[in-house]
Amino acid sequence: MPRKNTKKTSNGGYTPPPPIAEQKRQRRKDPSITPSPPYLLTSQFLDFTCSLPILKNACPAADDGGWRSAFPPDLVTFPTGKLSHSFRTDYVGDIDKDVTFEEYMHNTSGTANSVVGSSSNTISATLYNYYDFAFQTNSTTLCDLTHPLALCVLLVLVLMVRTVKKTCLPKFSSLGRRLGRAAHGPTWENDNADRIYKFGEYVYRLCYHSAVSIYGVWYFHKKSWWDNSQGGTKNMWINHPNQPVEPGMTWYYLVQSAYNVDALLSLLELSFTVELVNPFAYSSALDFLEKEHVVDEEQRKQQVLKMMAKSRSQTLLWTPLFQIKWSPTVRGDFREMMAHHLVTNGLIFLSSYYRLTRSGSMIFLLHDLSDVPIDMSKLANFVKWKVTTIVCFVGMVLMWIITRLGIFPFVILRGIVTECYEYFVLKGPMDPALHDAYYLLFYFGLGALLLLHVTWFLILLRIGWTLVSTGERHDYTEHKKGEKHKDS
């Protein structure tokens, strides 16, 4: 039987739980004593709340048993009490610490600097150290996206991505304009300004997805977790969390994160408009209608109220200073895309923090590979190349089935569900409480991603049915009711 702490307090004989390290030792010896996730999360929340400086004084003193002293002893007595367990949310004590730049400089002070130091060029030596730390050193603090250094690099990359995008989009849109003119005549662009802009956007996406797909296939094709003959997905978990994170993986994650953060920001910019609120709008509208020869007072007031009610119905958030409205350029699948970006970014940061980069990189690569034919299909549809659109659409559906509806659920998710506990807890150093408390969070995020894949696949089938039954190509991801075709 697990040992119990025999220290007593003055609070009715309540026995406080042992230190977290001892709790972990007992849970690893007998995982069955670990409470269910709701109790673990409740205990963690109360532990965190009573550790805050503002609320610390409001909780019972630690010498008196802390917040647990306010509960019935059967509920908080370790190890049988449902609220008796505490645990750390990190890998302290189980993981090899990420290499900081200061530690790198200390460890290489006699080697890296001497390589360039003979030239007496301090700038060159410093740049070499930065390069060697970022691109030649395994498991640096850059591999954890929640670390301040990684966040700073990520911010720079996001700004770079937005700058490149801002520079390239007009050029790509100009290409779409020329292709449209060649295919449909010089007047085509007059009625297709929005289509031309989106053409540029999808050329940019195609370039990105193609580039990262090529890099991903080149970098990962020999990795053991992609090769069933070497153990396949089991290699995503073996030796976790002390798997070395190579610079190629670190920068792959940084670039992917920067692109996805920018995609979320771009979706917000595309979907919403922010307008200042005019406090004198009512009286201004009355004056306007008076100038428009609506002289009847009651009639003017009713028309003004109708105008303001119509405007308010399009408002998502109203304040006395500004209001947020839906933009005319909002995507037809805004809800699905917003959910996708929120889930994706959340999984990126969580997987980086918990050293789940191997499984995360597999998910990245599957999405990028399937996005290439999607971008090609949309480009062909935007310029109305019928045969090319059909060919790309068929390729897109096949790739979607293979990657997002095949490999993702039946290889990656299967590995996560069936192998994680064995290699994390039974064969690894992870605290069973940490696994049990948060595994459902990852399951929920990945399950939501799979649900979105199915939802978009149904949209693709709807597009295909419209194409077969009517001969028209409606992109329901851009317009819920299909595209409004204009004569070219």
Image (spheres, rainbow, N blue to C red):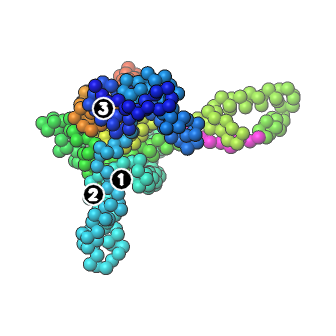
- Residue count near mark 2 (Cα–Cα under 10 Å), binned few <14, some 14–19, many ≥20: some
**Secondary-structure class at tag 2:** loop
Q: What is the crowding at mark 3: few (fewer than 14 residues within 10 Å), some, or many (at least 20)? A: many
Position of residue 338 measured from the top left corner of the image (x, y, whole percent): 47, 34
Seen at 58% across and 36% down, the residue is 58
Residue 276, magenta (yes or no): yes
Disc 2 or 1, which lies upstream in sequence?
A: 2
Indicate the amino acid at tag 2.
Thr
Can you see residue 224?
A: yes
Residue at screen point 31% across, 79% down: 120
Question: Is the residue 39 above or below the residue 153 in the image?
Answer: above
- Identify the mark at residue 428; answer none if there is no mark: none
Q: Is residue 403 left or right of residue 313?
A: left
Is 19 colored magenta in this rendering? no
Residue hosting label 3 = 26
Q: Which secondary structure lies at badge 3?
A: helix
Q: Residue furthest top?
A: 469
Work out whether residue 2 or residue 239 is closer to the camera in this orientation and state it.
Answer: 2
Mark drawn on residue 137 = 2
Real-space CA distance between mark 2 and mark 3, rounded to the nearest whole angstrom: 37 Å
